Each structure stands twice: as C-alpha cells, then as structure tokens.
Amino acid sequence: MRFDYTSMGFYTFDALCRPVNDLPPGGNTFFVEDFALAVSGAAGSAAIVAAKHGMKVQAVGGVGNDLMGDWVLRRLADFNVDTACMQRCEGYSTSSSIVTTRPDGARPALHKLGATAGFYVDETMIDHVLDTKIFHVGGVGLMDRMDMGRNAEVMAEAKARGCITTLDVFASTPDDLSLIRPLLKSTDYFMPSEEEAMALSGLTDLEEIAGFLLEQGAGAVILTLGADGAMYRDQRGARIDVPAFNIDVVCTCGCGDCFNAGFATGLHLGRSMEDCVRLGQAASAQNAMGLGSQAVVSSLEGTLTFMENTPTRCYSAA
C-alpha cells in the first residue's frame, strides 16, 4: 500500500489567540498573550499528528484558490503529508476559523465553512484515495457534496478493499444521524465526542449512547470524554475505560481530532486496543497543552515518553 493513513474531510485554516474572556466593545482592542496559526479540522489535525508519528499520510479534501489555501497546502507539505488529492475548489474560499481561547481552554470560534463543502471524490480518484492501510473520514456534517451519499459509497469501498475504517463527525442535532447512519455499517471505529454522540442519539447516558451507536452498525464506538477520559465499547462486548492524563490545559481546539490520529497510530503499530486508546489520549493531551492543533505533539517517541511519564486522573465517566 502507498499510504499508512488517509485522512479525508474537514481541513481548515485556524487563527488562534488566548486568553480571551470577551470581545472588545465597539471598535476597541484587547491585548492577548499568545497568537498562532494552524491547519486544523477533523481531517487536518489527524493527518498532521499521524505524520508526526511517522506514518505515510495522504490528505483528501478541499481548499480555495486563496492565500489560506496556499498556506494549508504548504503546511501539510512541511510534515510530508501527500496533497495530491487535495482539491482547489472553484467558487469556494478555504474553510477558516478564528478561535478565541478561554483561560480554561474552551475555544469559542467563528467559522467560514468554505471548500470543505465543495470537494468531491470521483471514480477517477478512488484507487489513489483508498491505497491505504487505514482510511479515516473526519467532519461528516460539513462536507455538503460528499455528505449526499458519496461518503457512504467511499467508506463501503474502503471496507471492501480491506482498509481499517475510522470515522469522526461534526454533529449538532439528532438530524445529523441521517448522514452518519449509512457510514456506520462500514465503520470499524466510530470516535465522536460525548457532546457529538449525545446530539446524534438524543440520549444522555453514556452506556446507552454507546449501545445505540453500536446498534446502528459500527464495529466499535469510542467516546472521548474530555477531562473524564475515554470509553471503548464494541460489538463483541469488549469494554475499556481509559482515564485522561493530568495536564494543565491551554487550548482544547483539535483534541478529538488528535485523539483519532493517536488511536490510528496504535492500530498501525499493532498495539492492544487499550494501548490504542491510550495513544489517542496521549496525542489529545499533548495537543491541549499548546495553542493551535498539534502544537505540542512532536514525534511518536515523544508521545510514548509522554504516556510513560505523565500521571492520569481518576476515571469518572457518568
């Protein structure tokens, strides 16, 4: 296979600053301590962390014919991410965000949807896109053209070709379940945050949510629970609960996306499922320690050292 990891979906240009408690009134100015630029998004952050962990990675998505798009492609290339399947989408700007990070790490954002809504994987691309060990789709709910059935077709073809399939979403209401359900029967590992999973299911109990999502066809469900850790449940009845690392949080932007790449790293290395989840937690925690997605993640060796040397919190999923 040409690639170890293919990350398809939401790529965004992010400008981040902290700390921000409020926007200045009128035309006034507030001064901030830190400012950063980053490639982010459910596919973008995952692609870069996977590359930093030493995997051969390709990016599949869309950017505009603008300076933000130029920068996103250049930054992906900085990490040796293959961008042959990144499309310049006519009539769209690059998906971009302004992220105002709170002192507690929360990150209210202003977002322009842009080219994530405009890219499309046609049949001429499919062999290149699926020439991969692990196929990840990140950002369902934002990919307007792909969400209209094409994501499900590509995911089914990935599964048929023997790829390991992983899935993440951008979900806000139960109505988004109609976009997710057709993909789940071809998904080995579905990895929403607890907030996304609650929105999709309309439920609040985490065990009931995991059960509901498994009933929709996913091979396994991993709920990321922020400071409470992560929980893994699968069709065979396996149950794994992993605590979060005890860290000082700077910014939580991209934490779930970095988790996805850390988890995939474990799959690529043939680690146990518990170790895969712990690698996801370690990538996510390092991400939270800096401003801008993937800021503190440096290498696989660095992530493994972080896992060994960083204490964890008590697991406390509700």
Image: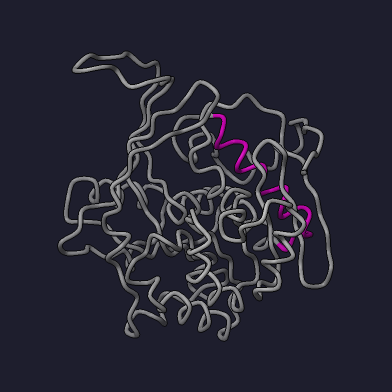
Residue 276 % position (x, y): 71, 55
Q: Quadrant of residue 274?
A: bottom right
Residue 318 % position (x, y): 77, 43
Residue 222 is covered by the magenta coloring: no
Residue 237 % position (x, y): 84, 68
Quick one: 49 or 293, which is closer to the camera? 293
Residue 108 as seen in the image, left or right of residue 312: left
Residue 71 as seen in the image, left or right of residue 235: left
Q: Main secondary structure of the magenta part?
A: helix
Which residue is painted at 77% across and 72% down in the image? Answer: 235
Say above or below: 29 vs 131. above
Which residue is painted at 33% across and 66% down in the image? Answer: 144
Say above or below: 89 vs 72. below
Quick one: 222 or 278, which is closer to the camera? 222
Q: How was this image coloured?
A: one colour
Quick one: 315 or 22, which is closer to the camera? 22
Residue 116 % position (x, y): 32, 59
Task: Count the labels in the image.
Answer: 0
Q: Which residues are magenta?
A: 270-289
Say above or below: 218 vs 260. below
